[in-house]
Image (tube, rainbow, N blue to C red):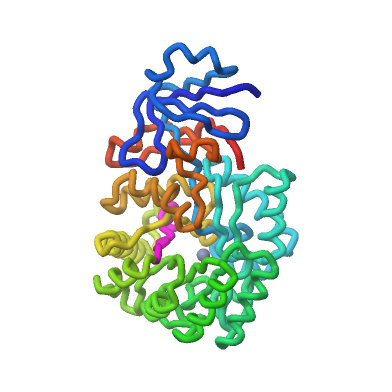
């Protein structure tokens, strides 16, 4: 295919504070070769074999990154029961369908945070080899957890400093792109304690030390504050959820946020609408009031973390309860609406800042990096001018990996 010109009302690169107005993206082969204003194109439009004008209302974005998924999970009411009941093959088929569906909503990179090794690495390889069309997959495979700990059913169980070192080596040998560790228990695994740390500081430090030795980043699942504190001490790369959860609700002190920021740790708060979708269908659910109160507290916590200097990355925890892979663009809108974070802040958290947390620069559209761009995804709406982010499915093109 010859050079392609895409015109749109706005092009946002995932980095700047504002989108370019009346802009274009030029694509040649598998690379984006230029991004600029249409006025600068004068006379050179005939150079292109194909011109696609998306119209004044379209905004072209880099491909979105979903920083937290579980590709084989059912998104049902009881993911533990589903995982135990379903065959390996069913889980594999679902993983394929989930990541394909994610790509159709503009998600071009998925960081998978806990799926059986065989499934996660096979799906990643199938995309990389061209066997199937899907987003780029960055996978931890099985997360490291204590015996009977959170997500043990798709994890590696390890109970001491020596065992977590061995577990890191096992996962790297199996093909993990990064290490996922469960620093506290979690709601979806019966018999775990979300408020308490699963590992001592010394054990978690042993894990991150081993991961660093093997040049792997670490994502730590954390609900209770004891897990936040061990994760800061161990200098993990990202804290997932970061709920500061106590039995009586969220308990957060600004000093804790500053310590996360000072350690250069990103937080992936996994905001998603899942349960809210059920409420929209039936607002009279007995758990409605408690859910809405908890949601408001979570949004308030996010604002305070950002105030403390913490950098957020976006990930939806797709695959868990009522949380479909296709919901992610809507989850970003939900995050904008629930907090006073700007649409640009949230878009960055799902593009350039997420790429930074992954140690990749592939989504960044700086002119010095032209030629290495993966994907653009036009959204209709005006994400950068209004207080809400408007995203609809639209046309997409893929360039490069
Ligand atoms: Zn998760």
Residue stretch rendered in magenta on the structure:
265-277
Residue 27 appears in view:
yes
Residue 322 appears in view:
no
Position above or below: 62 against 198: above
**Which of the 4 image quadrants contains residue 201?**
bottom left
Q: Position of residue 18 (x, y in %)?
A: 31, 37
Residue 273 within the magenta-colored segment of the rendering = yes
Position above or below: 369 against 26: below
Q: Position of residue 86 (x, y in %)?
A: 70, 64
- Drawn side of residue 18 relative to residue 241, left or right: left
Q: Residue at x 50, y 57 (%)?
A: 358
What is the quadrant of the N terminus in the image? Answer: top right
Q: Position of residue 221 (x, y in %)?
A: 48, 70
- Total number of numbered labels? 0
Position above or below: 298 against 64: below
- Drawn side of residue 132 relative to residue 40, left or right: right
Q: Residue at x 58, y 75 (%)?
A: 144
**Which of the 4 image quadrants contains residue 156?**
bottom right
Q: Residue at x 25, y 73 (%)?
A: 255
What is the quadrant of the C terminus in the image? Answer: top right
Q: Position of residue 243 (x, y in %)?
A: 37, 69
Position above or below: 280 against 266: above
> Foreground residue, 306 or 202?
202
**Which of the 4 image quadrants contains residue 311?**
bottom left
Residue 166 within the magenta-colored segment of the rendering = no
Q: Residue at x 37, y 18 (%)?
A: 39
């Amino acid at each position: 295919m010859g050079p392609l010109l895409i015109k749109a009302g706005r092009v946002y690169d995932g980095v700047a504070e504002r989108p370019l107005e009346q802009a274009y993206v030029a694509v040649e082969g598998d690379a984006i070769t230029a991004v600029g204003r249409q006025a600068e194109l004068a006379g050179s439009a005939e150079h292109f074999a194909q011109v696609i004008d998306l119209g004044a209302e379209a905004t072209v974005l880099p491909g979105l990154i979903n920083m937290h998924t579980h590709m084989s999970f059912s998104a049902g009411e009881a993911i533990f029961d589903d995982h135990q009941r379903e065959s390996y093959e069913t889980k594999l088929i679902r993983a394929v369908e989930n990541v394909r569906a994610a790509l159709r909503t503009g998600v071009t990179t998925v960081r998978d945070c806990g799926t059986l090794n065989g499934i996660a690495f096979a799906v990643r390889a199938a995309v990389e080899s061209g066997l199937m069309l899907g987003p780029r997959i960055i996978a931890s495979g099985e997360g490291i957890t204590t015996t009977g700990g959170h997500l043990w059913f798709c994890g590696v169980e390890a109970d001491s400093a020596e065992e977590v070192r061995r577990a890191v080596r096992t996962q790297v040998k199996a093909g993990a792109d990064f290490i996922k560790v469960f620093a506290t228990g979690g709601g979806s695994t019966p018999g775990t304690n979300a408020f308490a740390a699963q590992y001592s500081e010394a054990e978690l430090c042993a894990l991150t030390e081993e991961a660093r030795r093997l040049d792997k980043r670490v994502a730590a699942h954390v609900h209770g504050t004891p897990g936040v504190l061990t994760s800061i001490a161990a200098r993990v790369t990202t804290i997932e959820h970061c709920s500061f959860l106590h039995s009586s609700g969220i308990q957060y002190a600004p000093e804790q946020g500053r310590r996360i920021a000072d350690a250069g740790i990103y937080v992936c708060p996994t905001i998603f609408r899942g349960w809210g979708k059920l409420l929209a269908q039936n607002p009279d659910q007995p758990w409605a009031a408690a859910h809405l109160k908890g949601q408001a507290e979570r949004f308030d916590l996010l604002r305070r973390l950002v105030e403390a200097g913490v950098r957020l990355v976006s990930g939806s925890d797709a695959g868990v309860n009522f949380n479909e892979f296709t919901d992610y663009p809507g989850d970003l809108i939900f995050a904008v609406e629930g907090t006073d974070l700007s649409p640009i802040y949230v878009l960055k958290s799902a593009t350039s800042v997420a790429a930074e947390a992954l140690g990749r620069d592939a989504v960044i559209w700086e002119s010095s990096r032209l030629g290495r761009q993966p994907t653009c995804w036009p959204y209709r709406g005006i994400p950068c001018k209004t207080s809400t982010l408007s995203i609809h499915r639209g046309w997409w093109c893929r360039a490069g990996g």
